[in-house]
Amino acid sequence: MASAVFLGFAPRFQNGTELLLLLQRKVTSFLLLSLALSSILILLTWGTSSNTFMFTSKQALSDSAPSPGYPNIIHDLTPQITYDEAVLPSGNFIADNSTATVSSQVPNKNSSSIIEPCDMSTGKWVRETREPIYSNLTCPFIPENKNCRNHGRSPGYLYWRWKPDGCDLPWFEPDRFLSIVRGKTFAFVGDSLARNHFDSLVCLLSQAEVPINGDRNPYKRFHKVHFPSSNFTVMMIWTEFYVLGMPRTNVSVSASFEIHLDKINTAWTSQLPGLDYLVISGGNWLYRKNYLYESNKLIGCVFCRGENLTEYSLPYVIRRVVRKALESIESCQNCDKLVTFLRSHTTSHFEKGSWFNGGFCNRTEPLNESELDFDAPEWEIRKIQKEEIERIKQFDGVGDTNRKKRYKWLDVTKAMMIRADGHPGEYYNKEFSRSAYDCLHWCLPGPVDMWNEMLMLNLINTSSLD
Ligand SMILES: *[C@@H]1O[C@H](CO)[C@@H](O)[C@H](O)[C@H]1NC(C)=O
Ligand SMILES: *[C@@H]1O[C@H](CO)[C@@H](O)[C@H](O)[C@H]1NC(C)=O
Ligand SMILES: *[C@@H]1O[C@H](CO)[C@@H](O)[C@H](O)[C@H]1NC(C)=O
Ligand SMILES: *[C@@H]1O[C@H](CO)[C@@H](O)[C@H](O)[C@H]1NC(C)=O
Ligand SMILES: *[C@@H]1O[C@H](CO)[C@@H](O)[C@H](O)[C@H]1NC(C)=O
Ligand SMILES: *[C@@H]1O[C@H](CO)[C@@H](O)[C@H](O)[C@H]1NC(C)=O
Ligand SMILES: *[C@@H]1O[C@H](CO)[C@@H](O)[C@H](O)[C@H]1NC(C)=O
Ligand SMILES: *[C@@H]1O[C@H](CO)[C@@H](O)[C@H](O)[C@H]1NC(C)=O
Ligand SMILES: *[C@@H]1O[C@H](CO)[C@@H](O)[C@H](O)[C@H]1NC(C)=O
């Protein structure tokens, strides 16, 4: 199998988003627009042949990079300069193993008893006969580019359930979820995978109550949906990097960004006060040639071999931005009640290429454990995310007894590594992307709904503390 394939995110924006407007100024006819977007996608996208682990392989990827001169892949996992070594995690954070099962209690649907979640991050997908909670017929908010059934996909991928090793993950219960979050405000912060998670939650909850302002535009950068009878609001707030990231030029719709590692992007942090729950995720936009700044000075770049600049590793950059994000949350004023989840990174499942060089994902069953690649960069990114959430927990509430910020780890990486069959593949409306397979996002309904089951179980636990 091949999973170590990365794409910069396709800039498939619609009217109302700044990048497309930029592009529309340049290109007027639809054909040209498509062509332009396609070439940009090629620039933004690159893949590798099977089993190449980009960060340990000593092999450059020039043979499979779709565009000559595209940045080669960095080889080194370790930061090339020292960043704040003194406070980097020592590595002795809680190991998977030590967060083992607290209880194997099967939650009682009707009871409000406190449920102790187990470690839900390891387990297996088992066959399931029950229909998903929603479908293309019962949720009108499924974006067409995730609406796999509408686009001809056979339903086999729907009949699997995640079975954590130590307990049962209860089915999502829309009514119960809405009663837990009554009067609360919830936000997803991140990129199109955060949007995927948000859309899943909206569909799940819409089975209990029709929300106001649900829509299917998958490209909206800010989106707020309200559930009136439970006075629950859920938002999607877009950020590629958490920190300030600016397109490097206006012309190319930014194959590259200028990333200011020390400047938080206040577009999302300004939304934090008053929030009850936050789910952050991300990382996908860092898999491209980007330029790094500190104190407004260019300090180097990532995925940029050949430039006369210091080259930083992807893990280094991920750590910097995740830490900056978590520290910004921690220092937020008027965020006393905030509970933050960090949702772990997930993998794509392109085989034999990527978006535009024929990469596909047409598996019809989950992978076997033996097929998983724990040398994959996604697994390394997950490790960094986990270290950073453990690190920030040490500061939780320190020196301020009024403050109740809490940090939680929503670890879906392994479960999703298995679900090579859960992506839209060729079954979506392709709009600008021609015949490319989408092996990165997840079908709705689909395995991504499980993230909300995990979330619900955690909320039950969290709200019991209030
Ligand atoms: C879990 O930890 C125990 C010791 O606490 C160790 O004996 C065991 O091998 C570990 N299991 C795994 C899967 O790491
Ligand atoms: C839960 O409540 C429903 C009715 O509201 C009832 O039919 C069902 O038996 C209850 N289940 C349990 C496990 O108590
Ligand atoms: C929804 O999915 C079904 C298959 O379950 C399919 O037949 C139908 O065309 C899809 N779309 C709509 C709008 O019903
Ligand atoms: C709805 O919830 C918000 C907080 O999210 C609160 O300020 C407002 O008063 C609530 N409205 C009602 C009618 O309960
Ligand atoms: C991009 O456009 C904005 C305004 O449209 C301008 O302020 C900025 O300088 C431009 N940047 C480049 C690199 O051309
Ligand atoms: C690299 O940059 C340094 C300092 O900016 C400069 O002295 C050197 O000539 C550059 N090397 C190349 C190959 O461009
Ligand atoms: C998956 O797609 C590839 C390329 O189109 C094709 O060669 C292969 O037979 C397909 N496999 C299945 C199981 O459909
Ligand atoms: C996956 O496991 C099943 C059952 O253990 C086996 O039949 C199948 O051949 C395996 N597939 C691969 C690709 O290893
Ligand atoms: C659930 O809550 C208990 C305290 O009641 C806590 O010890 C435990 O870590 C929590 N579990 C999760 C997964 O949040």
Image (cartoon, rainbow, N blue to C red):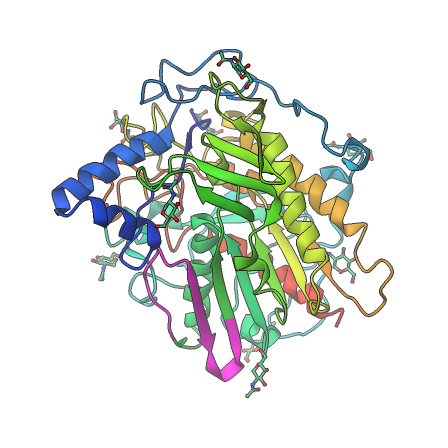
Residue 275 shows in this picture: yes
Q: Quadrant of residue 170?
A: bottom right
- What residue is drawn where x is 68% and y is 24%? 81
Does residue 34 appear left or right of residue 187 in this picture? left
354 in relation to 110, above or below? above
Percent x, y of residue 413: 56, 40
- What residue is drawn where x is 28% and y is 30%? 356
Q: Which residue is more in the foreground, 130 or 462?
A: 462
Q: In the image, ligand 7 is in what quadrant?
A: top left
Does residue 79 appear left or right of residue 173 in this picture? right
Q: Which residue is more in the foreground, 302 or 386?
A: 302
- What residue is drawn where x is 21% and y is 39%? 434
1 in relation to 92, above or below? above
Q: Quadrant of residue 207?
A: bottom left
Residue 165 shows in this picture: no
Q: Quadrant of residue 422?
A: top left
The image quadrant where one finds the N terminus is top left
Percent x, y of residue 440: 40, 40
Percent x, y of residue 263: 61, 47
Percent x, y of residue 51: 47, 19
Q: Is residue 83 shown in magenta?
A: no
- What residue is drawn where x is 34% and y is 60%? 142
Q: Is residue 218 shown in magenta?
A: yes
The image quadrant where one finds the C terminus is bottom right
User: Residue farthest to the top?
Assistant: 59
Question: What is the span of residues highlighted in magenta in the rendered image?
Answer: 213-233
Does residue 262 appear left or right of residue 52 in this picture? right
